[in-house]
Amino acid sequence: MQVMGISGMPGSGKSIVSDIATEKGAIIVSMGDIIREEAKKRGESSKETAKNLRKEFGEYIVSELTIKKIKKLQEEGVENTIIVEGIRSLPEVEMFKDNFDNFIILSVFANPELRFERLKKRMREDDSTDYNVFSQRDHTELNFGIGSVIALSDKLVINESDVESFREEIIEYFNEIKL
């Protein structure tokens, strides 16, 4: 079973990559979903929970919970490629590399203005129509270390054109790595 990661700032296009991977038979394990599930249990916002989990259990807690979930899938006999969506720090990358052979990272980049417009349309619970709130969220992500993950990823894809061109580039990459 191949395990790989996807990283990128909010609104960069990670979910499109995940959708394509799913179409190719991969299973998505979203670190953001893990945080959102925990936030719901705690009655907190996702932002608060992301900070509080790390404060309470250490900076690796989200990756630990993700690895636990993936290992459970392995124990259940899942052989599909598993995509970890939403890796945000180099220590998390190292944990995945320590736990899964040939672990690679695909990062997606899009400029802030374009990402903000996408998030305003998407309007998931943690999205905002206020640019200052969006910018603050970006700074939080960068403080987690996501910039280093993106900079040191195995593959970087720019997502600033039309969706179809982006999809074609992702499909081509997945074909290259035999996903």
Image (spheres, rainbow, N blue to C red):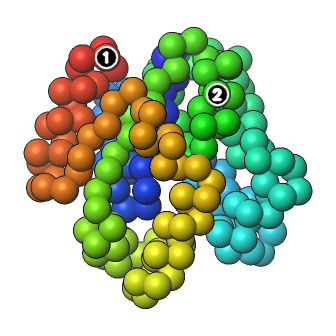
Q: How many marks?
A: 2
Q: Which residue position is annotated with label 2?
A: 94
Q: Is residue 28 visible?
A: no
Please name the amino acid that badge 2 sits on. Glu
Q: Which residue position is annotated with label 1?
A: 177
Residue 129 is situated, as x and y percent measured from the top left of the image, at 40, 85
Report helix, strand or loop for mark 2.
Answer: helix
Return the residue nearer the eye: 168 or 56: 56
Q: Please tell me how crowded label 1 is: few (under 14), some (14-19), or many (20+) other residues with Cα within 10 Å.
A: few
Alpha carbon of mark 2 to alpha carbon of mark 1: how far?
Answer: 21 Å
Q: Quadrant of residue 61?
A: top right
Is 165 left, or right, of 41 in this rendering?
left
Is 161 left, or right, of 176 in this rendering?
left
Residue 73 is situated, as x and y percent measured from the top left of the image, at 64, 25
From this view, report whether residue 19 is shown above or below residue 5. Answer: below
Residue 28 is situated, as x and y percent measured from the top left of the image, at 49, 38
Please name the amino acid that badge 1 sits on. Ile
Q: Quadrant of the C terminus?
A: top left
Residue 9 is situated, as x and y percent measured from the top left of the image, at 43, 56
